Amino acid sequence: MDGSRTHYVDNTSEFSSAGLTIRQKEPKNLEAPFDRIDSYLTPTGLFYIRSHFPIPALDRASYRLKVDGAVKRPLTLSYDELRSMPSETRVATLECAGNSRVFLVPQVQGAQWELGAVSNAEWTGVPLRVLLERAGLLNDACEIVLEGADRGTPKEEPVPPEPISYAWSLPRAKAIRPEVLIAYQMNGRDLPRDHGFPVRAVVPGYYGMSSVKWLTRIQAVREPFHGYWNTSDYGYWASMDGMPVRRPLGEMQLKSEIARPRVYETVIPNRVYMVFGAAWAGETDVTEIAVSTDGGRTWAEAEFLDPVRRHAWRRWKFDWLTPEEPGQYTLLARAKDASGLMQPDRHDKNHGTYVINHPLPIEVFVDGSGGERL
């Protein structure tokens, strides 16, 4: 991994994104500085940015959100009408399904995310189920399609014959869960353009592609939605009656990451160094965290800094007495959830270039000479 960082300042946004690492300039894909995030809530200006197409130009006055499809009473809401409805606020961690792709060997295609395509924020909006209830969701609706205003032509094969909007479907059972929000605020302020202004979906517990930004349509459908991203892009291989089938990604998988020390950081021998990181899961709770400082041969329990909160990360720390012997050392972190499930030892190839949730090796140098290795 390259330890250098390129900084990007966006003068058209409502906040400064200086300090984020460019993974792609257009559409804008910027990585959070995971090694510098100490707070429970990620500051909005340091929250990672994932875009599929250029940011659409939307404004409060003309914005409309349509709810239709397999419903009794299709409806259209203005921004002010949505804001006037009773709201709820929830903390949720969002992670790009391709986060940590740079750790895959050999290198694969796609944005080379390191550790920072994950962030934690407080979201305010109207529960999706309230809108579906108002519209009269029909009993035979099986999925809810969320459609954004951003449009374009995907670059990955098979390429659609014409430009399409970004859209993702949720299973009905997830869509009517109380935690799923149609959000208009992030960390107590109106959404910035980069994060979906004026309105976006926030789907806690699911990978970030489910939380559709610049949301303009909510459509209930009676048949499984086979849109581009649900099938061609964000899919994985499963088995049905012994036959391989494609399924859309959904629930975030149990994962932990080491924020400090950074990759290739040099630390002083025989000193206590506080190893720091975070762990999260999808529809379960992270209950244990362990750290290895010898490449996985031995493990020791680390200490959580945050209480259990479903759908939000838990930061943790571990006091490491660095070795007296100079050299290169490999640090790993491994989480366990409430059911006793532990992170897998290796990446599941059925997930392709997504769901990189095995313990990620952080290589560091122990050196007492005072020299910094690059």
Image (tube, helix red, strand yellow):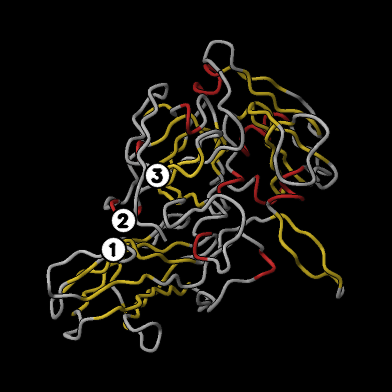
Left or right relative to 170: residue 321 = left
Residue on which disc 3 sits: 21
User: Element under label 2?
Assistant: helix
Contact check, label 1 and label 2, Cβ < 8 Å: yes
Q: Nearer the viewer, mark 3 or mark 2?
A: 3
Left or right relative to 282: residue 292 = left
The Cα atoms of the two marked residues, 1 and 2, are separated by: 6 Å
Q: Nearer the viewer, mark 1 or mark 3?
A: 3
Q: How many marks?
A: 3
Residue found at x 58% / y 28%: 54
Q: Position of residue 120 (x, y in %)?
A: 40, 48
- Disc 3 or 2, which lies upstream in sequence? 3
Is 9 or 344 nearer to us in this picture?
9
Q: Residues within 10 Å of mark 2 (few under 14, many from 20)?
A: some
- Disc 1 or 2, which lies upstream in sequence? 2
Q: Amino acid at mark 2?
A: Asp
- Disc 1 or 3, which lies upstream in sequence? 3
Quadrant of res 201: top right
User: Element under label 1?
Assistant: strand
Q: Quadrant of the C terminus?
A: bottom left
Q: Residues within 10 Å of mark 1 (few under 14, many from 20)?
A: some
Is 297 or 24 nearer to us in this picture?
24
Q: Quadrant of the N terminus?
A: bottom left
Mark number displayed over residue 186? none
Q: Position of residue 309 (x, y in %)?
A: 41, 58
Q: Amino acid at mark 1?
A: Arg
| Residue 80 vertical placement versus 155 (above, below) | above
Is 243 or 313 nearer to us in this picture?
243
Please identify the residue farthest to the top as the structure is shown.
Answer: 61
Mark number displayed over residue 35? 2
Residue on which disc 1 sits: 260
